[in-house]
Image: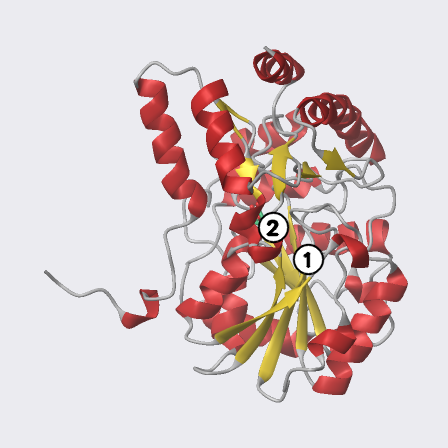
Amino acid sequence: MIQKADRLNDVKEYYFSKKLREVAALRSAGKPVINIAIGSPDLHPSANVIEALQQAVTLPNAHQYQSYQGIPELRDGMAQFYKANYHVILNPANEILPLMGSKEGIMHISLAFLNKGDEVLIPNPGYPTYASVTNLVEAKPIFYNLNAENNWLPNFDEIEKNDLSKVKIMWINYPHMPTGAVATKDDFKQLIAFAKKHNILIVNDNPYSFILNDNPLSILEVEGAKEVAIELNSLSKTFNMAGWRVGMVVGDAQIIKTILEVKSNMDSGMFLGIQKGAVEAFKLSNDWFQKQNEIYQERRALVWKIFDALNCTYNPNIGGLFVWAKIPADENSEALTDKLLYEKDVFITPGTIFGTNGEGYIRASLCVDTATLNEVLKRITA
Ligand SMILES: Cc1ncc(COP(=O)(O)O)c(C=O)c1O
């Protein structure tokens, strides 16, 4: 048997990759499992986006390798998107790098800036990929605590009790997944000041700013932010294009160039049709966001009812693509979600997959239609 690489010692198979196999096995055994765990938008992209993809397949260069930096039209669209929605001016020639989804950017950024043994500040709870990629590149995750008392924002006094001299990157993600918490511009200012003080690169992972959130913000809106911060963004949730795999990393030209040094050695450009579709997505007006959010609002009201039935509590003033709920004190996250899976045929995410501070919480997704959510409610109250 060939031994796997040491770098995999601290990395486990992604929770959903494993758990969805179990859900599939239950379904093939005849169990009608409903999945309200995963944030994969079920709504479709706009018709113009799909049409642009379809038309692109007949273009003369449609099936050739594409530019490592994406077509100029796509970077222009991304620059326009940042200007219109966040008032951030980016040079499309060198401050934007299209990605095949923001998830791959987490690896590219880590490969570009981390040496073995470097330390990385990672939110607990947070998106699990930050820690697994940090382990894969043989750097060291240093988890910082987020909790409800602090509105799920970093506590700098607590973080500064650590020796930060080896910390090179800090991952932040506002609006935050899984809790839905948002950072204000003042919070971002504090983060930038912290990064400057400790010479740390902050990466804000920002795929959720348009979902049930009235005030989309970019960390790059803060003056001087580009010196120490970059941002990941994505079309997955904003434009219902998760399976297309389109995202971007934006920021200082030199930092983007360094990331390109990694990325250009890993893939050979993004399919032209996908880029053409993405260009159309960036042309959509605010109506698009409004219509999406009306649907999500209706679904969220039902998820709240489901959580009420489970005696869970949640913050109704918080947005995002998920509802994050506190479970009764005598319950445990994984035991509760397993009970719901095996007894009610409903798959919900235990908060613990996002870190130890997720104990005591569960997360439900809004990527499920109202008929299905009503069925979940029926099963839970039965
Ligand atoms: C916080 C966070 N970052 C990044 C991603 C990855 O998004 P993308 O589809 O752009 O790779 C997700 C997807 O669920 C996410 O929740």
Give, as a three-letter code, the residue at label 2: Gly
Q: Is residue 359 above or below residue 135?
A: above
Question: In this orientation, does residue 99 appear?
Answer: no
SS label for mark 1 = loop
Q: Is residue 263 above or below residue 317?
A: below
Residue 358's label in the rendered image is: 2
Q: What residue did someone put label 1 on?
A: 173
Residue at 46% in and 83% down:
117
Closer to us: 206 or 136 = 136
The residue that appears at 22% across and 64% down in the rendered structure is 4
Tell me where residue 106 appears, x and y as whole percent.
54, 62
Q: Amino acid at mark 1?
A: Asn
State whether label 1 is within 8 Å of ligand 1: yes
Q: Position of 316 compared to 249: left or right?
A: right
User: What kind of element bears circle 2?
Assistant: helix
* Spot occupied by residue 97 in the image (x, y as percentages of width and height): 60, 62
The spot of residue 100 in percent (x, y) is 51, 51
Spot the residue most to the front.
330
Residue 334 vs residue 78, the one in the foreground = 334
In the rendered image, which quarter is residue 235 located in?
top right
Q: Is residue 177 visible?
A: yes
The image quadrant where one finds the C terminus is: top right
